[in-house]
Image (spheres, rainbow, N blue to C red):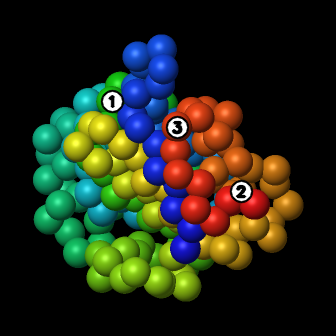
Amino acid sequence: MPTVVIRMTKPSGETVALMEILRALPDNAWTWTILELWAVGIPPEGMTMPSFEDLISSSESGYSMTWPELLDLAARLDQVMDCLIVATERPHPAPRRLADQDDAPELLVRIDALDSTEWHITTNARLRTLAHPCVHACCMLKCLHGDHTDQGCP
């Protein structure tokens, strides 16, 4: 799957927010699964951030969300240090083992934040066929931040 890598910091010194990464993708009805998260912000369902992070890390299937729920969470996160978020078309959460595979056709999107220094956004080649101008993440991310690798970009 093509991967885009960008630094977490823009030339202005601001960090790149998860919401900016999500804006590179079309509205969708996919199942989003958070498999890892270390962040600062307000988690869902009145949880504390440590309890939300523990819930995610202790579950084989992470924490499942719809696209609107993921957008809502992203809007409430001040900073993401580490995360692993994946999207599939399956109606249930993606298991960790699926995200660990190098080439999983079921996986549509994989978003990794690594050590507060960079984002890795991996998209399934099928996304290029969707009718949205920014479905191939690097198209939007080139505008978001010019310093990235563009493996697989047209």
Which of the labelled discs sits on residue 13, or is there none? Answer: none
Mark 1 falls on what kind of element? strand
**Residue at the extreme top of the image, as rendered:** 12
Residue drawn where x is 46% and y is 63% of the image: 110
Viewer-nearest residue: 148 or 129: 148
Viewer-nearest residue: 112 or 39: 112
Mark 2 falls on what kind of element? loop
Residue neighbourhood size for the residue with mark 1, other residues' Cα within 10 Å, grouped as few (<14), some (14–19), many (≥20): some
Q: Is residue 115 above or below residue 31?
A: above
Q: Quadrant of residue 45?
A: top left
Residue neighbourhood size for the residue with mark 2, other residues' Cα within 10 Å, grouped as few (<14), some (14–19), many (≥20): many
The picture places residue 133, in percent across and down from the top left corner, at 81, 50
Q: Foreground mark, 3 or 1?
A: 3
Residue drawn where x is 35% and y is 25% of the image: 78
Of callouts 2 and 1, the N-terminal one: 1
Mark 3 falls on what kind of element? loop
The picture places residue 10, in percent across and down from the top left corner, at 47, 25
Disc 1 residue type (three-letter): Gln
Q: How many marks?
A: 3
The picture places residue 6, in percent across and down from the top left corner, at 46, 43
Of callouts 3 and 2, the N-terminal one: 2
Residue on which disc 1 sits? 79
Which of the labelled discs sits on residue 135, or is there none? Answer: 2
Residue drawn where x is 26% and y is 57% of the image: 36
Residue on which disc 3 sits? 147
Q: Is residue 58 left or right of residue 73?
A: left
The picture places residue 122, in percent across and down from the top left corner, at 51, 63
Residue neighbourhood size for the residue with mark 3, other residues' Cα within 10 Å, grouped as few (<14), some (14–19), many (≥20): some
Viewer-nearest residue: 30 or 14: 14
The quadrant the C terminus occupies is bottom right
